[in-house]
Image: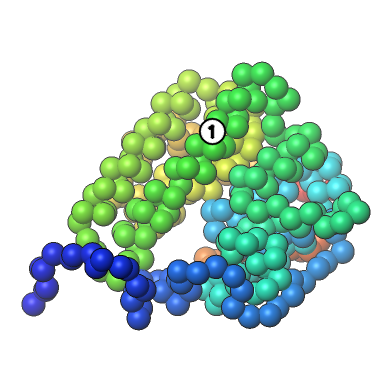
Amino acid sequence: MNDTTPYVPPAIWSPPPSSGGRFANINRPVAGPTHEKDLPVGRHPLQLYSLGTPNGVKVTVMLEELLALGHSGAEYDAWLVRIHEGEQFGSGFVAANPNSKIPVLVDRSGAAPLRVFESGAILQYLAEKFGAFLPAGGAARAECLSWLNWQMGSAPFLGGGFGHFYAYAPSKMQYPIDRYAMEVKRQLDVLDRRLAEVPWLAGDDYTIADMAVWPWYGTLVKGQLYEAGEFLQVQAYTHVLRWTNEIAKRPAAKRGRMVNRTWGEASSQLHERHEAGDFDTHTQDKLGTQAPP
């Protein structure tokens, strides 16, 4: 028999013995490291510590796009961080990102290592460093940064909100699922209306705004996120589908989506990336002819 007694919050909250759900083993109410572990360092200027979740994919797509443009300084090592095993709480990772979330980038091209955390900040940092995928000024730059920050503010409702209660919570609850499904569909409508007017989110050009939004909302409308495509009737968002299909055809986007990925078909996974050659010949044939120099 189900307990239908309404939950009454206590006067002072304390963490339960187990919060339940898929991520219960890493949830905790404090920050800081849980163990000593240095971060590995490869030979390239840029060191990325990440996992192939949507937030991680944003950055690997950006790096692969920069390499495809010929920016050799964007060569990078992508190290796998197994968040389900708590590797983001190692002392080295926390020193690079005090928020203990993937991804984090360490730029070693200067006199001293420079850390950049939060995926939107990493995209903007790389765009400004290499002068690519971010308009130089005016209305186009403002539009690009507006959509970049729209994604940063909106995706938690999709991931930690809808995704958690629909796919990961220990039991299904109507109120939070209805609440977040409503918001996610509103967000999809925002995107669909924008993409009915322009080919890319910032206007005429593909930018970091598209790279930020695509791994979340593009994956969602393809029915590949939380297995919620039918539930949310994502096929109705035809302009978002057109846009996501365009990005999905880009060889750099295909490569970026593979990096630090540990699930799905074996051919779609590249757990760590340290050289362009790590995308083997068989895989490159599937990705297309464009390859980093």
Scheme of image coloration? rainbow
For mark 1, give the secondary structure: helix
> How many marks on residues?
1
**Amino acid type, residue under disc 1 in the picture:** Trp
Up/down of 44 relative to 245, above or below: below
Residue 52 lies in what quarter of the image? bottom right
Q: Position of residue 162 (x, y in %)?
A: 34, 53
Q: Position of residue 69 (x, y in %)?
A: 79, 39
**In the figure, is residue 273 to the left or right of 32?**
right
For mark 1, what is the residue?
147
Question: Image point 68% across, 47% down: which residue?
Answer: 122
**Between residues 128 and 215, which one lies in front from this camera angle?**
128
Is there any visible trace of residue 187 in the rendered image? yes
Q: Position of residue 76 (x, y in %)?
A: 79, 57
Q: Position of residue 192 (x, y in %)?
A: 42, 31
Question: Image point 73% across, 38% down: which residue?
Answer: 127
**Between residues 112 and 290, which one lies in front from this camera angle?**
112
**In the figure, is residue 54 to the left or right of 132?**
left
**In the figure, is residue 143 to the left or right of 48?**
left
Question: Image point 67% across, 58% down: which residue?
Answer: 104
Question: Image point 81% across, 68% down: which residue?
Answer: 41
**Between residues 186 and 257, which one lies in front from this camera angle?**
186
- Circle 1 crowding by C-alpha within 10 Å: few under 14, some 14–19, many from 20: some
Residue 132 lies in what quarter of the image? top right
**In the figure, is residue 195 to the left or right of 189?**
right
Q: Quadrant of the N terminus?
A: bottom left
Residue reaching furthest front?
11
